[in-house]
């Protein structure tokens, strides 16, 4: 079972690499952007032709939310054209695509967790390109899993947790918004979920009673629970025994080029039911890597 992972040097790509040894039945091929430029269709076809993967996990994405507002072409090239290129390559070579999307496809106006059936309505370039990438995959073929996630952090690459720890080493006080509510997601937990989907998909492919068409589609995944960015920062400092003057502020006091959803908690009922996942609470997962 050959599993191609794009975006190998990114946060999720590194998280998958960190647990890949637990899956000896999977032959992983990790490609960084220099190995595989997903925005280049010919490059995608060449890599797929050489590797002939059974599965492709697309961990490559343009995730600079604010920068996307001034670089829409770059965001589109990776998040839309790249997703389409991978879907077309998967279709041509008979592979299954696992594509990671985001809570930013929603506008954040709900007050209850978003389900997979809720109507997307992104408010910025990043969210729109991720939604357009989803649509490009859906228009190409049926053999896909789109996994929407939120607030991803880990010991790898750049993320909110590492930024807070760095700033705490440089400053005596910090202000963090407390009116944006969502759920932190440990990248390793997300990686484990993706590989479980790969395993179950592979088992179904080789079983006499294959029911894959009923499994393909869109799923939500994050850790359990919810918090504000302020709550998240407070817990990061508490777990790491860091004393700092941390102040809650409203979003209006911290303007950014891109508008953030004020509420983006994801309902995980579907993924837990279909793939029998047990998902850690966000606080528990944060303790696991701090």
Image (spheres, rainbow, N blue to C red):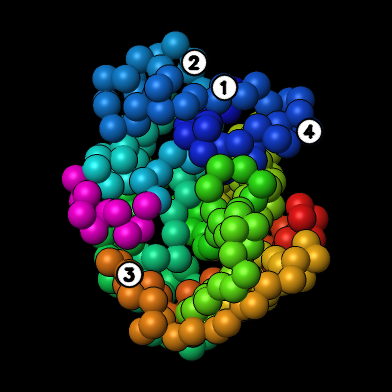
Q: Taking 36 as reference, is 16 above or below it?
A: below
Visible in this render: residue 194? Answer: yes
Q: Nearer the viewer, mark 3 or mark 2?
A: 3
Residue tagged 4: 22
Labels 1 and 2 touching (C-beta < 8 A): yes
Residue shown at 76%/52% (left/top)? 289
Q: Which element carries disc 2, helix, strand or loop?
A: helix
Instruction: Identify which residue, 278 or 232, lies in the foreground.
Output: 232
Q: Nearer the viewer, mark 2 or mark 4?
A: 4
Q: Which element carries disc 4, helix, strand or loop?
A: helix
Q: Which element carries disc 3, helix, strand or loop?
A: loop
Pointer 1 or 4: first along the chain: 4
User: What are the residue bounds of the magenta stretch?
Assistant: 64-73
Q: Taking 265 as reference, is 10 above or below it?
A: above
C-alpha span from label 3 to label 4: 40 Å
Pointer 3 or 1: first along the chain: 1
Instruction: Identify which residue, 140 or 185, lies in the foreground.
Output: 185
Residue tagged 1: 29
Q: Which element carries disc 1, helix, strand or loop?
A: strand
Assign the N terminus to one quadrant of the image.
Answer: top right
Assign the C terminus to one quadrant of the image.
Answer: bottom right
Pointer 3 or 4: first along the chain: 4
Residue tagged 2: 51
Residue 100 belongs to the span the image colors magenta: no
C-alpha span from label 3 to label 1: 37 Å
Quadrant of the image occupied by residue 238: bottom right
Q: Which mark is residue 256?
A: 3
Labels 3 and 2 touching (C-beta < 8 A): no
Residue shown at 47%/32% (left/top)? 6
């Amino acid at each position: 079972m050959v599993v191609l992972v794009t975006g190998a040097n990114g946060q999720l790509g590194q998280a998958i690499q960190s647990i890949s040894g637990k899956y000896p039945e999977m032959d992983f091929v990790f490609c960084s952007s220099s190995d595989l430029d997903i925005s280049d269709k010919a490059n995608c076809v060449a890599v797929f032709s050489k590797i002939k993967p059974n599965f492709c996990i697309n961990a490559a994405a343009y995730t600079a939310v604010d920068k996307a507002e001034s670089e829409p072409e770059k965001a589109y090239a990776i998040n839309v054209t790249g997703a389409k290129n991978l879907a077309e390559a998967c279709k041509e070579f008979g592979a299954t695509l696992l594509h990671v999307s985001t809570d930013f496809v929603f506008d954040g106006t709900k007050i209850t967790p978003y389900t997979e059936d809720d109507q997307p309505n992104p408010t910025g370039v990043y969210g729109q390109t991720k939604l357009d990438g989803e649509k490009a995959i859906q228009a190409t073929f049926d053999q896909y899993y789109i996994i929407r996630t939120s607030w991803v952090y880990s010991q790898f690459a750049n993320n909110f947790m590492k930024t807070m720890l760095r700033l705490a080493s440089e400053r005596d006080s910090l202000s963090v918004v407390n009116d944006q509510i969502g759920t932190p997601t440990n990248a390793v937990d997300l990686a484990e979920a993706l590989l479980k989907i790969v395993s179950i998909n592979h088992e179904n492919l080789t079983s006499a009673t294959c029911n894959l068409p009923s499994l393909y589609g869109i799923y939500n995944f994050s850790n359990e629970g919810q918090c504000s960015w302020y709550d998240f920062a407070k817990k990061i400092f508490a777990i790491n025994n860091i004393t700092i003057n941390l102040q809650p502020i409203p979003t209006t006091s911290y303007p950014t080029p891109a508008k953030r959803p004020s509420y983006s908690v994801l309902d995980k009922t579907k993924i837990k039911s279909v793939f029998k996942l047990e998902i850690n609470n966000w606080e528990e997962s944060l303790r696991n890597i701090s």
